Image: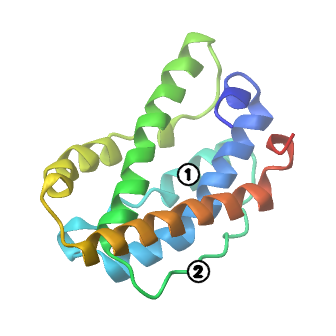
């Protein structure tokens, strides 16, 4: 998905739409299951700004099917870890002089959150926490997959 959006403005707009579609329900879920001081930074507002700059409407939110047993660590890890790919995409887009808004890709909040989260993730966990974290991370990935199916027709090939 990232390679297709380096210089192609439409593909980049599709990428942002997929991100917004998936993150909309995931941010609500994070508010519900994460401790108040460990909720990942919201990114839908800056995604909406980038989409508006490209003349794109807000996409339909993806479906989210939270598992019965979850632990917030998995959701936080999956969302925060994705910031590494966003930074790499930003660097590549700048190398090819791709225009367009980059508030989402350049926002420092999620990489900072990820750095602060790493010591928590490094602590030993019980099997129950590990199982719940894996289930939560898989739900995050499934939500992004749903968003890709909703809004990523050009990436399906």
Sequence order check, earlier mark of 2 and 1 = 1
Measuring from the top left, give residue 67's x and y in whole percent. 50, 82
Q: Is residue 134 above or below residue 123?
A: below
Visible in this render: residue 106? Answer: no
Instruction: Write down the residue under mark 2.
Output: 65
Relative image position of residue 141 (x, y in whole percent):
56, 59
Q: Secondary structure at mark 1?
A: helix
Residue located at (38% from left, 73% from top): 30
For this rendering, which residue is in front, 110 or 157?
157
At 80% from the left and 41% from the top, the residue drawn is: 155
Image quadrant in which the C terminus is located:
top right
Q: Which mark is residue 93?
A: none
Identify the residue at image location x=48%, y=35%: 85
Closest to the camera, between mark 2 and mark 1, is: 2
Can you see residue 31? Answer: yes
Whether residue 16 sits left or right of residue 141 in the image: it is right
């Amino acid at each position: 998905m990232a390679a297709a959006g380096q210089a192609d403005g439409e593909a980049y707009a599709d990428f942002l739409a997929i991100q917004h579609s998936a993150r909309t329900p995931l941010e609500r879920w994070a508010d519900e299951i994460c401790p108040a001081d460990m909720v990942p930074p919201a990114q839908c507002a800056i995604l909406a700004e980038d989409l508006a700059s490209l003349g794109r409407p807000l996409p339909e939110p993806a479906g989210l099917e939270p598992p019965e047993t979850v632990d917030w660590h998995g959701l936080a890890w999956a969302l925060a870890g994705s910031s590494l790919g966003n930074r790499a995409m930003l660097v590549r887009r700048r190398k090819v002089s791709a225009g367009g808004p980059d508030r989402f890709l350049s926002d420092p909040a999620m990489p900072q959150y990820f750095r602060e989260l790493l010591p928590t993730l490094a602590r030993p966990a019980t099997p129950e926490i590990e199982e719940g974290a894996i289930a939560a991370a898989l739900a995050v990935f499934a939500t992004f997959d749903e968003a890709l199916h909703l809004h990523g027709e050009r990436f399906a090939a």
